[in-house]
Image (cartoon, rainbow, N blue to C red):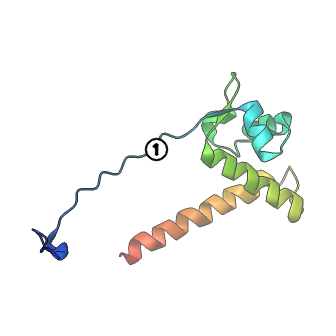
Amino acid sequence: MSDPAYPASKILARIEIVEAASAAYPLDAAALMTGVHPEMLRYYCRLGLLGTRRAGTEREPTFDDNALYDIRRIEHYRRHHGVSRRALPLVFALLREVERLENEVRFLRGP
């Protein structure tokens, strides 16, 4: 066998990481993917559960992958834990606060 020109332990590789563009789904597609009626998605938008930028829009909302995750999470709490529609804003505000505090603790603890 021939000797390689460079030993494997000395080879440098340049890796370029490209962030994928976030997909945007129209209301009907998001409703189909999540199994939630479009009117319920509009209701969630009005409540601000899917972000403040969707809460006050006059045009048809679009949803990214994060919003689809949030919709599934909302439905999980509603269907499996009996959280009422009226309690959803409070529950999700508390969940966001817990996530924010967890991130702050992780940051303060360091690597």
Quadrant containing the N terminus is bottom left
Left or right, 55 with reference to 6: right
Quadrant containing the C terminus is bottom left
Residue 63: give x, y in percent of width and height: 65, 37
What number of labels is visible? 1
**In which image quadrant can residue 48 be found?**
top right
- Residue closest to the eye, 65 or 49: 65
Considering every residue shown, the one lying at the far left of the view is 5
Considering every residue shown, the one lying at the far top of the view is 59
Residue 61: give x, y in percent of width and height: 68, 30
Residue 70: give x, y in percent of width and height: 69, 51
**In which image quadrant can residue 33 be found?**
top right
* Residue type beneath disc 1: Ala
- Residue closest to the eye, 1 or 81: 1
The residue depicted at 18 percent of the width and 64 percent of the height is 12
Considering every residue shown, the one lying at the far front of the view is 1
Left or right, 108 with reference to 61: left
Residue 110: give x, y in percent of width and height: 36, 75
* Label 1 SS: loop
The residue depicted at 71 percent of the width and 25 percent of the height is 60
The residue depicted at 74 percent of the width and 32 percent of the height is 27
The residue depicted at 17 percent of the width and 67 percent of the height is 11
Give the vertical position of 87 relative to 107 (above or below).
above
Left or right, 80 with reference to 90: right
How packed mark 1 is, by other alpha carbons closer than 10 Å (few <14, some 14-19, many 20 or more), is few
The residue that mark 1 highlights is 20
Left or right, 35 with reference to 66: right
Give the vertical position of 99 relative to 108 (above or below).
above
- Residue closest to the eye, 41 or 56: 41
